[in-house]
Image: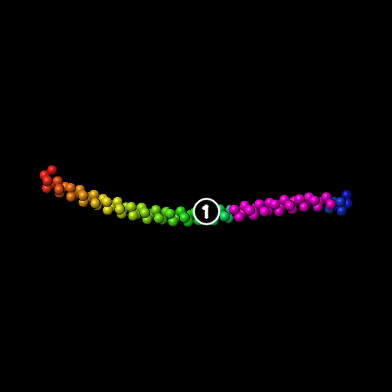
Amino acid sequence: MTPEKRSDQLEPIMAEMLQKQDKYFGQIQFLGMNILDLAGRQSLTTIRLDKIETRLDKIETRLDKIETRLDDVDAKLDMILTILRSKNGH
């Protein structure tokens, strides 16, 4: 086989391989962009979750304070009821 015939046989094979390589490179780029997008979204989600957690902690603190105040009110009401009962002879 002459070098020219060999070259004629290799040329279509190389062209097909290069086409496939371009196709795969495009798919890899697409996947890479999607991975970066997902990583960015995950990062934003983490930031949002941290903010939500902070807000929930603040709400929990406020609820604890409200609970303490309600306990104080309950104790005062019990004391008032005790006084009223003792005055009425119950």
**Rendered-image quadrant of the C terminus:** top left
Query: Could you tell whether 52 is left or right of 86 in the image?
Result: right
Does residue 33 belong to the magenta stretch?
Answer: yes
Q: Is residue 8 left or right of residue 35?
A: right
| Residue beneath the point at 30% across and 53% down | 66
Q: Is residue 67 left or right of residue 53?
A: left
Residue 30 pos. (x, y %): 63, 53
* Total numbered circles: 1
Q: Residue at x 39, y 53 (%)?
A: 56
Q: Which residues are magenta?
A: 8-34
Label 1 residue SS: helix
Q: Is residue 77 magenta?
A: no
In this orientation, which residue lies closer to the viewer: 84 or 18?
A: 84
Which amino acid lies under the numbered mark 1 shown in the image of this protein? Gln
**Residue closest to the far right:** 2
Q: Residue at x 24, y 52 (%)?
A: 72
